[in-house]
Image: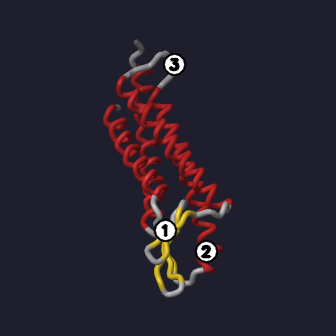
């Protein structure tokens, strides 16, 4: 049970770091504009070595930002619940921290999936046609890797919960 929780906690911490780095950096998309290379993230775009804030309030950017922030926050809450499940610290008899951590990681996975799907759909259908020579970049890829890490963290914590429940049913206290 503890090995599942340890693996889940490792995946969650790595996933949360990747979520924060992916959300904060400016390399979601790279493209060629007027003969020079440019790149953009959720908050800024950079051209010719100078970066500018994204001042346009475009719905897909706002939605992607919001879902990425919500994903990082729910992953962080899952990490706290996961650490507490290691410590067996509970004020409630019927509250299982492993289950709560697993649910928070799945919620985080859902939020990052929504963010990545919105950004991908708009980029491919709108921006991809606007810029001929473009590609997704490493910040974007980190977002997808974070999705996998939070998903596996949820799987690990649900396995730990099932093992705990099976032991509790087989050997009542």
Do residues under tags 2 and 1 come within 8 Å of each other at their CB atoms? no
Of the numbered discs 2 and 3, the one sitting upstream in the chain is 3
Q: Position of residue 84 (x, y in %)?
A: 40, 27
- Viewer-closest of 34 and 17: 34
Do residues under tags 2 and 3 come within 8 Å of each other at their CB atoms? no
Q: Quadrant of residue 117?
A: bottom right
Residue under circle 1? 51
Q: Position of residue 29 (x, y in %)?
A: 50, 70
Q: Label for residue 127?
A: 2
Q: Label for residue 94?
A: 3
Distance in Å between CA atoms under marks 3 and 1:
52 Å
Q: Residue at x 45, y 51 (%)?
A: 20
**Vertically, is 105 above or below 116?**
above
| Outermost residue toward the top in this view | 173
**The N terminus sits in image quarter:** top left
Q: Position of residue 37 (x, y in %)?
A: 46, 80
Q: Disc 3 on helix, strand or loop? A: loop
Q: Position of residue 63 (x, y in %)?
A: 63, 55
Q: Disc 1 on helix, strand or loop? A: strand
**The C terminus sits in image quarter:** top left
């Amino acid at each position: 049970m503890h090995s599942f929780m340890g693996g889940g906690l490792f995946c969650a911490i790595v996933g949360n770091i990747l979520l924060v780095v992916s959300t904060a950096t400016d390399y979601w998309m790279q493209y060629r504009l007027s003969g020079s290379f440019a790149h953009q993230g959720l908050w800024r775009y950079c051209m010719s070595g100078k970066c500018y804030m994204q001042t346009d309030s475009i719905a897909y950017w706002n939605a992607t930002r919001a879902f990425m922030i919500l994903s990082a926050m729910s992953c962080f809450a899952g990490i706290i619940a996961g650490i507490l499940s290691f410590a067996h610290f509970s004020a409630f008899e019927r509250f299982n921290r492993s289950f709560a951590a697993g649910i928070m990681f799945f919620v985080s996975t859902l939020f990052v999936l929504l963010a990545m799907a919105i950004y991908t759909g708009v980029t491919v259908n709108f921006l991809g046609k606007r810029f001929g020579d473009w590609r997704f970049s490493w910040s974007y890829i980190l977002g997808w890797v974070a999705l996998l890490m939070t998903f596996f963290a949820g799987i690990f914590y649900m396995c730990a919960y099932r093992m705990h429940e099976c032991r509790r049913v087989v050997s009542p206290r």
